[in-house]
Image (cartoon, rainbow, N blue to C red):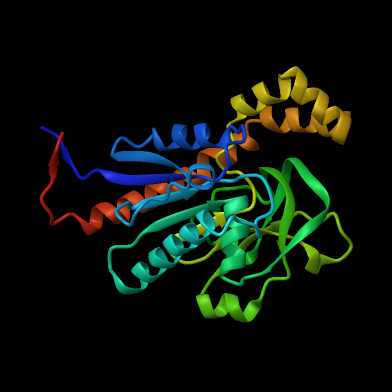
């Protein structure tokens, strides 16, 4: 009879009841791991917040201003993050957190890593992302091309990182926006290794090529993209979604590697505990 220790994963839905593909994609990635049991929490719309009993937390993207909350869900959310951070400082058995897009902006602001700013123009597409020197040796990025491609949809950005604060936290910027500006210091942060157990990306590493192509082919979505961004953007998104070494490569490498590393460490903590029969 096979025995194992189930790993508990919480998916934090930050979409505020807005239609999205992200949560389904996160579930599909979690389903790859037979030892994982997961639950979904609707943080913003239903004010559902998980407790500290989970091992891994995936905090999704979502719409709106990352600096705005209602004083209820956002307080509970940051209280949870503060407790998880403090837990990792005090315990050998760590809690693992991955932040995506809106959540990434929120935690960067909460940790005072950089400034949140409204972009000059909305980023919308599957875009090249530059790996930094620190990112080149990060286990989540080592197998990626440089630049690699990520699904990026945002009106806001994290810019002007605070080097002193990053050093204080022992956090590292692992990816930056591929420059389309003349001023390099305005390049947005695209990924940060907050700690050994916490990681975040501005782009959507969970984006699924099949889902993206389906989204792009929906008549109302195609019409919207053409009206706002033009045919060149639409055709480039379709090309990058179908390219085997672009969106699919990112989807297959980053989040699965994060989860696998977390599961391996979690199981190592519990190797001497009573196993669970299945």
Residue 86 position within the rendered picture, expressed as x and y whole percent measured from the top left: 38, 71
Task: Left or right? Give the position of 98 relative to 248.
Answer: left
Query: In the picture shown, does residue 221 fall above or below 4?
Result: above
Number of numbered tags placed on the structure image: 0
Residue sitting at 57 percent across and 67 percent down? 110
Quick one: quadrant of the N terminus?
A: top left
Query: In the picture shown, does residue 41 fall above or below 110?
Result: above
Quick one: quadrant of the C terminus?
A: top left
Q: Residue furthest front?
A: 71
Viewer-proximal residue, 120 or 255? 120
Q: Is residue 191 visible?
A: no
Viewer-proximal residue, 62 or 203? 62
Residue 24 position within the rendered picture, expressed as x and y whole percent measured from the top left: 51, 31
* Residue 178, image quadrant: bottom right
Task: Left or right? Give the position of 221 relative to 267.
Answer: right
Residue 211 position within the rendered picture, expressed as x and y whole percent measured from the top left: 60, 26
Residue sitting at 85 percent across and 28 percent down? 226
Task: Left or right? Give the position of 128 relative to 181.
Answer: left
Residue sitting at 61 percent across and 29 percent down? 209
* Residue 29, image quadrant: top left
Task: Left or right? Give the position of 176 relative to 87.
Answer: right
Q: Is residue 119 visible?
A: yes
Residue 58 position within the rendered picture, expressed as x and y whole percent measured from the top left: 46, 48
Residue sitting at 66 percent across and 76 percent down? 162
Viewer-proximal residue, 10 or 243? 10
* Residue 244, image quadrant: top right
């Amino acid at each position: 009879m096979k025995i194992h220790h189930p790993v508990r994963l919480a998916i934090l839905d930050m979409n505020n009841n807005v239609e999205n593909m992200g949560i389904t994609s996160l579930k599909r990635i979690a389903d790859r791991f037979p030892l994982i049991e997961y639950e979904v929490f609707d943080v913003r719309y239903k004010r559902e917040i998980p407790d500290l009993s989970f091992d891994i937390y995936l905090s999704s993207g979502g719409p709106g201003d990352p600096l705005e909350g209602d004083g209820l869900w956002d307080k509970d959310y940051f209280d949870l993050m503060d407790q998880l951070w403090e837990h990792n400082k005090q315990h050998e058995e760590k809690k693992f957190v991955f932040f995506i897009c809106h959540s990434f902006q929120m935690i960067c602001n909460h940790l005072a890593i950089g400034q949140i700013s409204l972009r000059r123009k909305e980023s919308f597409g599957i875009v090249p992302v530059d790996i930094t020197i620190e990112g080149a040796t990060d286990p989540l990025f080592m197998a990626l091309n440089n630049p690699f491609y990520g699904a990026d949809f945002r009106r806001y950005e994290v810019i002007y990182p605070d080097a002193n604060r990053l050093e204080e936290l022992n956090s590292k910027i692992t990816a930056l926006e591929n420059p389309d500006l003349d001023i390099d210091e305005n390049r947005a942060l695209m990924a940060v290794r907050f700690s050994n157990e916490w990681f975040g990306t501005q782009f959507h590493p969970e984006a699924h090529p099949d889902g993206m192509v389906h989204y792009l082919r929906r008549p109302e979505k195609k019409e919207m993209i053409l009206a706002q961004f033009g045919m060149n953007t639409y055709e480039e998104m379709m090309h990058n979604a179908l390219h085997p070494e672009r969106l699919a490569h990112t989807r297959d490498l980053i989040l699965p590697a994060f989860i696998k590393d977390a599961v391996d460490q979690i199981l190592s903590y519990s190797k001497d505990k009573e196993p669970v029969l299945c």
